[in-house]
Amino acid sequence: MSTPTSSTAATGRLSSASAVDAARAEGRAALVGYLPAGFPDQRACVDALRASVAAGLDVIELGLPYSDPVMDGPVIQAAAETALRGGTRIRNVLESVEQLASAPEGERAPVLVMSYWAPVLRYGPAAFARDLASAGGAGLITPDLVPDEAGEWIDASDEHGLERVFLVAPSSTPARLASTAAACRGWTYAASTMGVTGTRSSVGSAAAGLVQATRAAGAERVCVGLGVSTAAQASEVAGYADGVIVGSALVRALSDGGTAGLEAVVRDLAAGVASPSR
Amino acid sequence: MTAQPVFERFGARGPYFGEFGGRFVPEALIAALDELDAEYTRAAADPAFAAELERLQREYTGRPSILTEAPRFAEHAGGARVLLKREDLNHTGSHKINNVLGQALLTKRMGKTRVIAETGAGQHGVATATAAALMGLECVVYMGKVDTERQALNVARMRLLGAEVVPVSTGTATLKDALNEAFRDWVAHVDDTHYVLGTVAGPHPFPAMVRDFHRTIGVEARAQVLERVGRLPDVVAACVGGGSNAIGIFHAFIEDEGVRLLGLEAAGDGVETGRHAASITGGVSGVLHGARSMVLQDDDGQTLDSHSISAGLDYPGVGPEHAFLASTGRAEYRPVTDAEAMEAFGLLCRTEGIIPAIESAHALAGALRVGRELGPDGVVLVNLSGRGDKDVDTAARWFGLVSDADLVASEAERVSAPVAETEGSGW
């Protein structure tokens, strides 16, 4: 088992898989937290994420704001629009990655970028992989790129030793669970419900079964996202998954309560993942 | 003319057309797309499906649509013969019904009870609401908030037909955002809902399937032109937004190598101004709404706003098969500005007594240009994809046909919504 600060051997970059393993070694699930880069502005976003790591966040999921986010609900759509209106460009996202990756011990965690495929394709998958790796990023989560279409990204991410997180959904067939799990590098993202991002009163009942099926299909690590917003939900999901992904709730906490409000929510969620309900 | 089959599966089936097409969608939608693809494949091989669709197209839509020669209009087109394929005479006023009836039948075959659709100015929304009423399906239409305000009459039309119209306020609050919202709805309701996508864009199998449902346009027209003229046309012209009417009329001619296929894109104020919707002429290869194709986007891959006087063509992408036909050179795509389209619009009204949709007026403008290139021996087939009733307000403003008092009365609306973006049809 690696420690949370262990790195991929050659590069000195943190890997999110190591962070998930470290949490598992402590008998808990990892807490993965999302904010769109440039929200509310570049500096504030980076500061908020560093504070969140200090408050218990294990893995950073940094969104690359996109004009047409079909997987996102209203909260993240609005935040991404704010970031884009503020002039956030891909180079700013990579800069943010670099700032997060060079944060001092205690405020530093592996950074996965989450991006729709259009911006990465335009940047050039090979160039994006190169620049993400050199910024110190751990890898990429691709909500609208399925492995079937990902040949170019698989090659590029392999070449630069980047993690590659694809999604599975309650509607995925066993064959697709297997092919998706095999294509992932690091961990597999299980969408808890059929729907878009956003807080929900309960996490989809299909989530536990999906995690089990995804593991059975060969996934080494499975983290669950969509709809998790409270410590109780985090604790529930931690009972069956390797990681708990929280997005909209963090965006809302930062909007409503600033960095202090966000820290409080992260601490609460961290307590949740640390006491998995079995 | 000999009876032509209304529905026949033919040609490239996707998911790829050269480097274009594919499925760039969340994993959650893959199962629904697979289900649709499988059901469509079964239906396409089922004579009962083809028979039912043909019956509906004959008895409800009014197919085959007629071919009208436009000799007085043609005097302005270098004397070339101009033949209009009259999709404007279909029930609901455009070609959109061809696709919608096919997809509504598939919805019932899949045992789904609810359909959703996106619409720009309302033509596809009205067609979907119509088919839903006909077949007893629940119907929700997503429409950019800006468009619902500008197209209040079409909103009322859809509501009369029993559909729920949901204004979309996110993003630019126009057609592309309506598509985003329809995809979000579909992800959450795939169990009972079919997404009736309105053009030959989107993830596989939509581009090939929607094309197949519109292919009847070209199959009919090819036989009609042969009968009328005694030979194939030199050029087949059609407007291209997402590209459904164009692929519908092009497809039957693809193997006729001597026939030029001419797609006319909306150039708005002119491609060079940046205010246009010409995705092939002025765009780049990229991903939008589930497929790789030609799109209008900035250096960062962010979708750019499109601009056209025609809301039906006002979309920053295009179907992948068009991108492919452009890349191989089998079809040519040329830009037509708002001004050129409106000139052709006015000309057809005055010379032939036909008010075309502003979308279709782009094809007419292309016919005028190419007719002058061909000269008197030329034969140009134009897809008159829709009628222009819905565009009368835009045209009245454009040509200054409304009184000062009328203009004062609608001043507030004009200030908030520039004329060039207030009306249209198509999608």
Image (spheres, helix red, strand yellow):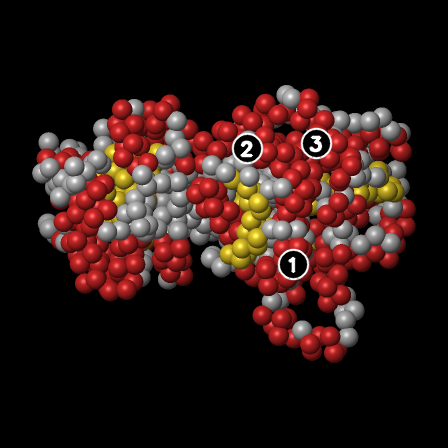
Viewer-nearest of discs 3 and 2:
2
Mark positioned earlier in the residue sequence (3 or 2) = 3
Percent from the top left, x then y, of residue B64?
Answer: 80, 35
- The reply to whether label 3 and label 1 mark residues of one chain is yes
- Same subunit under labels 3 and 2? yes
Name the residue: 19% across, 44% down: A235
Marks 1 and 2 sit apart, C-alpha to C-alpha, by: 29 Å
Residue beneath label 2, please? B111
Residue B162 visible in image: yes
Q: Position of residue B415 (x, y in %)?
A: 60, 72
Q: On what subunit does the disc labeled 3 rest?
A: B
For disc 3, the marked residue is: B53
**Helix, strand or loop status at disc 2:** loop
Mark 3 closeness class: few <14, some 14–19, many ≥20 residues within 10 Å: many
**Which chain does tag 2 point to?**
B
Q: Position of residue B6 (x, y in %)?
A: 74, 30
- Check disc 1 and report the residue beneath it: B156
Comes first in the chain, label 1 or label 2 = 2
Three-letter residue code for mark 2: Gly
Q: Earlier in the sequence, mark 3 or mark 1?
A: 3
Q: Image quadrant for the C terminus of chain A?
A: top left
Task: Using the image, determine if residue A120 lies above or below residue B418.
Answer: above
Residue drawn at (73%, 64%) of the image: B393
Quadrant of residue B309 in the image?
A: bottom right
